[in-house]
Image: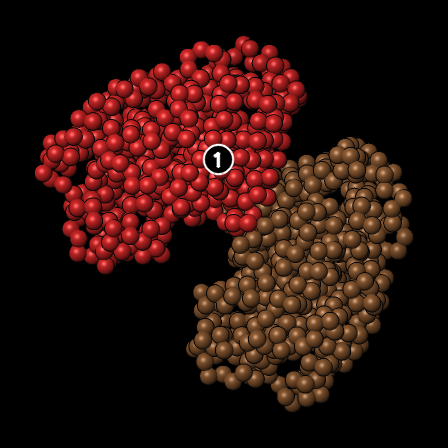
Chain colours: A brown, B red
Amino acid sequence: MSDSSAFDRLVVELRRITLFGSCGSVLGWDEQTYLPPAGGEHRANQLSLLAGMRHEMATSARVGDLIAAAENEVRGEAAESPRGVVVSEARREYDRATKLPQALVEELSRVCSLGQQAWIEARKAKSFAQFQPWLEQIIALKREEARALWNGTGEIYDALLDAYEPGASTAEVAAVFDALRPPLVTLLREITESPRQADPSILTRTYPRAAQEEFSLAAAKAIGFDFDAGRLDVAAHPFCSGFGPGDCRLTTRYDERHFPGAFFGTLHEAGHGIYEQGLDRTQYGTALGDSASLGIHESQSRMWENFVGRGRAFWTHFYPQAQRQFSDALGKEPFDNFYRAVNDVRPSFIRVEADEVTYNLHIMLRFELERRLIGGTLEPADVPAAWNERFAASLGLTPPDDAQGCIQDVHWSAGLIGYFPTYALGNMYAAQFFDAARGELGDLDAQFARGEFAHLKEWLNAHIHRRGRLYKAPRLLEVVTGAKLSHEPLMRHLRRKFGELYGL
Amino acid sequence: MSDSSAFDRLVVELRRITLFGSCGSVLGWDEQTYLPPAGGEHRANQLSLLAGMRHEMATSARVGDLIAAAENEVRGEAAESPRGVVVSEARREYDRATKLPQALVEELSRVCSLGQQAWIEARKAKSFAQFQPWLEQIIALKREEARALWNGTGEIYDALLDAYEPGASTAEVAAVFDALRPPLVTLLREITESPRQADPSILTRTYPRAAQEEFSLAAAKAIGFDFDAGRLDVAAHPFCSGFGPGDCRLTTRYDERHFPGAFFGTLHEAGHGIYEQGLDRTQYGTALGDSASLGIHESQSRMWENFVGRGRAFWTHFYPQAQRQFSDALGKEPFDNFYRAVNDVRPSFIRVEADEVTYNLHIMLRFELERRLIGGTLEPADVPAAWNERFAASLGLTPPDDAQGCIQDVHWSAGLIGYFPTYALGNMYAAQFFDAARGELGDLDAQFARGEFAHLKEWLNAHIHRRGRLYKAPRLLEVVTGAKLSHEPLMRHLRRKFGELYGL
């Protein structure tokens, strides 16, 4: 390979585009964490400019030529060879980007930046009406985006889903959700009818903010998030943003009368962060240095949050620390009551605070509404009614206001449509990966009970993180676990865990 | 004027360049405030890319053509007309930028980003040796920059000074410093020999950090910094960064055993911030929406810090609050002792903590060394010896280590050479502006004693901030005060204030 091969020049160019995009990530993070109220418009202008310039870089004829030349160079190599994947993923992203008009990209960035700021205010005011004009603009733009991207087969929502879960189709997602729903609903009914109920009020005692922060940081550190290469800050919506090698930002939010929010939120985001920190930095900018899909990303966050963080073994180690840290709230509370409380299954309004069982129902609802919004059979103005109707049908509750209903999540305000289903896919992937890890690593629970999480983390590093996007999600799942996507491992996990807790 | 006049198109382009540059400011701010240690290299790469792209935008043939066409359009208009100034300042900056090779701009950005990170560590380690390789690289690059920019008249240091104080020359600065030095040294000797000395130990009692933060924020707010459009965060070096309309960031640092550092530092940066917030946002991106010079900028920060913030009237209002906030340290301390302590004049090591009298001597030392570094008569390796020798000659003290000597300031690590003299110019401008304000606004002290600062702020808004760079600094001074730059108003202020305090 000479230095001036098209492949090498393509990699230099891909790095430059990714590096440039990462500058926008810094501004996006700051917008959510530290932006003063009056700075919103200027920030929207900055982000719109950067998005437009990034799009221009990514769709330049120069990049197109380099991809074509690199395709010639790697033609003899296997499709799953590292070089082959770098080039084919560059092609996939280039073809996608060139379908989007520059003006649409800039407008989407600007409107979504302002939309997120409007969403924060609307959520505070518990008013969908206040957010509605923004949702209308955003849905109109996302429909335009979907039309520009769609290849005409399957369903138009595929075009948006593909951005987050390459290779997945709406029909496949709907099928696996349809398979998951009945056993989930059955389990939920059995749990709800069980006489052995937890006392969740344990978790709404007073948990001082400083102690929550210290405890959350300690747990995130214990499971392997490296704070030399990252931070935890406060934002209205918890998220993880990997800026690039050595810099990954997590956010959370604290409520002194609700322990699980910040704690499990931090574990969740730390799970994302451990993935970001585990990427191969020598491959930065190419598909090999990037995550496989959002579903795979979510499998990591949900694994650390739920499979590890809500497990008996985890709390065997951490509960004595929690009792010291929150002595007023937990000092005299027996382990079992606390463990049951953090695993309380109960229909509730807020997705990010939902238990492992009902969580997937929250996702299915969003998936259904999004499909209709993009397909044109639901208009933004009708979202609250549709939400409340579907929520009641699915979870048996009616949200008391929009903040606990259709405007609870940041996603739509940020233009992230097609994103929600990856959360439930993540739960299923997580169950499958966790079974595989357990098969190879032996008694993980014994390790967790001793506060040892390194074996699992290193296994995930080796089998998932360091592979980047060498394999697309369905193929990665097969390579790592030997199986295809299925709802069954997740249901087995839920049956086993909650069967024991609720005496089913 | 049609929408498509060259002037209008130039303004659109200037706004775009400024907007793009402001994205880099966000990353620069984050680097100083929240960047995790391992993120330094990636941040340097990001900043280098942005600096290079900004330079490319600012030096494009398209911009050059627009400037030339706009020059034709405004040819009949007065040199000090708003349109004339927008075009001539665009020309000045374009000609300056096009003299700098793209590679130099990128390399300077990268090295200075890493250099600042290295400086933080070197200062912690009190080791010039640790910083020396970075200083060598930076000085070599700044010499190259100066050579590229210098027009061959005057002195090569002019080329760097011009970036911060357009229109000023090294010779003029040296002349006014030479005029200031003798009366300053005389005053300092009289003060030092006075039997009426303050007790500065009052200020090194325990001042809890949270209370310092609250008190500093309250004072910054009181003098008129708008926290809806800005923030105060913590950084190794206090600074102010105006990102653009509605978003201006201040930083400070807290030391529980040193009250003045954070407090006067915050007032100082808030003074800069009030200037940034007072700029005409409709002129964003052009010279009319930008500050006049760094010297004028510094006149604002030093005015609020010293002429207002270290004044008797200011503390008449704030001291009772300070006594409540810091009851352990100040509860029983008489007003006069505190007032004398915050105005204690005494040779000391750290510039940003220096009193109003010795401060200018710190600047003259740096100006002298910088001139020699750029002129080639001083090498980076010899800086500590030269610093310590000149420091002893000027202030009668020998720094105990480099952290209290030649590596105390961030500037050189950030490539800010030619910047220091603007601080002393700012002191002189401030004295002249303050005299003018007092002449027009009557008894400012009576207002300050009531906690009223709005008249002064609005006067500064109208006479200085909203004018942008319609006038260059020397001309602005004349327009506002009717006089030329002189050391005399500053000396009169110092003589009057410290004459009273020290019974001279």
Q: Position of residue A264 (x, y in %)?
A: 59, 68
Q: Secondary structure at mark 1?
A: helix
Residue closer to the observer: A62 or A35: A62
The local crowd at label 1, few if under 14, some if 14 to 19, many if 20 or more residues have their Cα within 10 Å, is: many
Figure check: B296 above or below A162 = above
Q: Position of residue B178 (x, y in %)?
A: 27, 19
Q: How many marks?
A: 1
Residue closer to the observer: B358 or B166: B358
- Where residue B183 sits, quadrant-wise, is top left
Residue closer to the observer: B463 or B372: B372
Instruction: Please state if A472 lies on the left or on the right of A256 as rendered.
Output: right
Instruction: Please state if A94 lies on the left or on the right of B361 as rendered.
Output: right
Q: Chain of mark 1?
A: B
Task: Report the residue at 52% width, 71% height from top.
Answer: A258
Q: Position of residue A292 (x, y in %)?
A: 75, 55
**Residue at numbered disc 1:** B134
Residue A166 visible in this rendered orientation of the protein: yes
Instruction: Please state if A169 lies on the left or on the right of B224 as rendered.
Output: right
Task: Report the residue at 76% width, 78% height from top.
Answer: A492
Residue closer to the observer: B3 or A419: A419
Quadrant housing the N terminus of chain B: top right
- Where residue B399 sits, quadrant-wise, is top left
Residue B293 visible in this rendered orientation of the protein: no
Task: Report the residue at 12% width, 34% height from top.
Answer: B193
At label 1, which amino acid type do we have? Trp
Quadrant housing the C terminus of chain B: top left
